[in-house]
Image (cartoon, grey):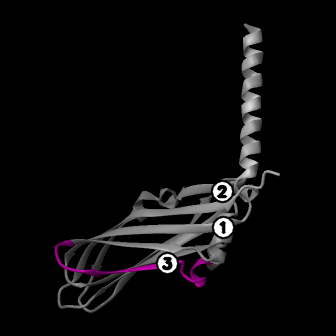
Amino acid sequence: MQAVAVRSMRIFVCAAVATVVVAGCGNNRVLVDVDVRSFLDPSDLVNTYNAPPFIPASTRIDPIQVNLVETFEDFGAADAATLDIAIDYVNNTGTGTGDFTLYLGDDASTLFSTAPVATLNVNLQPSTTTTGTVRIQADQRVLDLFTSQRLFLGADLAWSPNGVEPLQGRCVITVLTARVASRLSIF
C-alpha cells in the first residue's frame, strides 16, 4: 500500500516537473479575470435617480478597496488588460442622458482627482431600459494598478434631463470586469 503511494507521488512530481519545463519553453502567458463588480456593496450596484426637469442629478460611489491576488506581482508586469462595463438604465419617465464615469487608483484620498478610466454615456427615453456598454484597453497606469496587491475604485453617476418631465428610474451595474494578461517568469 505504501509502495503505491510512493509511486503515485513520484508520478505526480515527474508530471509537475514536466509541466514546468514545457511551460518554460512557451510564452508563459497568465490570464487573470477579476470580477471587480463583486467588490461593490450590493447597495452600490443599483442607483435610483430622480432629476427634476432641466436640473441634472448625480451621485458618487465612494472609493472601494479591491484586494487582488497577493502574489500577482510575482507573475511579472501586466502586458495588457481589458475592462468591460455594462449598465442597465431602467428609465421610467423623461428623456435625457445617463453618464457613468469609472475611476481606478492606488490611493482612496486622491482617487477622484486622477483621470477617469472609462466613461459610458447613454440616451434615456421614457418607459425604456437601455443598456450601455464599453470595453477599454488599459493604459500603463491601470496596468500597474492590476499588478499591485490592491487598488481603489470609485464612480460618478449623473443624469441630465432634457425635457419638461422629470428623469426618473434606476441604473444597475451589471458587468464590471477586468482581464489582465501577464507573463510568468519561471526560469
Q: Position of residue 167 (x, y in %)?
A: 24, 81
In whole angstroms, how far apart are the C-alphas of marks 2 and 1? 9 Å
| Crowd around label 3: few <14 · some 14–19 · many ≥20 (10 Å) | some
Report the span colored magenta: 111-128
Which callout, 3 or 2, points to the residue nearer the camera?
A: 2
Q: CB under 8 Å between callouts 2 and 1?
A: yes
- Residue occupying the point 62% across, 61% down: 181
Three-letter code, disc 2 = Arg
Three-letter code, disc 1 = Asp
Q: Position of residue 52 (x, y in %)?
A: 25, 86
Q: Quadrant of residue 175?
A: bottom left
Residue designated by label 1 = 79
Task: Examine the structure image and report whether residue 122 is included in the region drawn in magenta.
Answer: yes
Q: Position of residue 97 (x, y in %)?
A: 30, 84
| Crowd around label 2: few <14 · some 14–19 · many ≥20 (10 Å) | some
- Residue occupying the point 17% across, 86% down: 165
10 with respect to 57 (left or right): right
Q: Position of residue 171 (x, y in %)?
A: 33, 70
Residue designated by label 2 = 29
Three-letter code, disc 3 = Ala
Query: Height in image: 103 above or below 25?
Result: below
In whole angstroms, how far apart are the C-alphas of marks 3 and 2? 26 Å
Q: Nearer the viewer, residue 108 or 149?
A: 149
Residue sitting farthest toward the top: 1
Task: Examine the structure image and report whether residue 10 is included in the region drawn in magenta.
Answer: no
Query: Height in image: 54 above or below 5?
Result: below
Q: Quadrant of residue 162?
A: bottom left
Residue designated by label 3 = 118
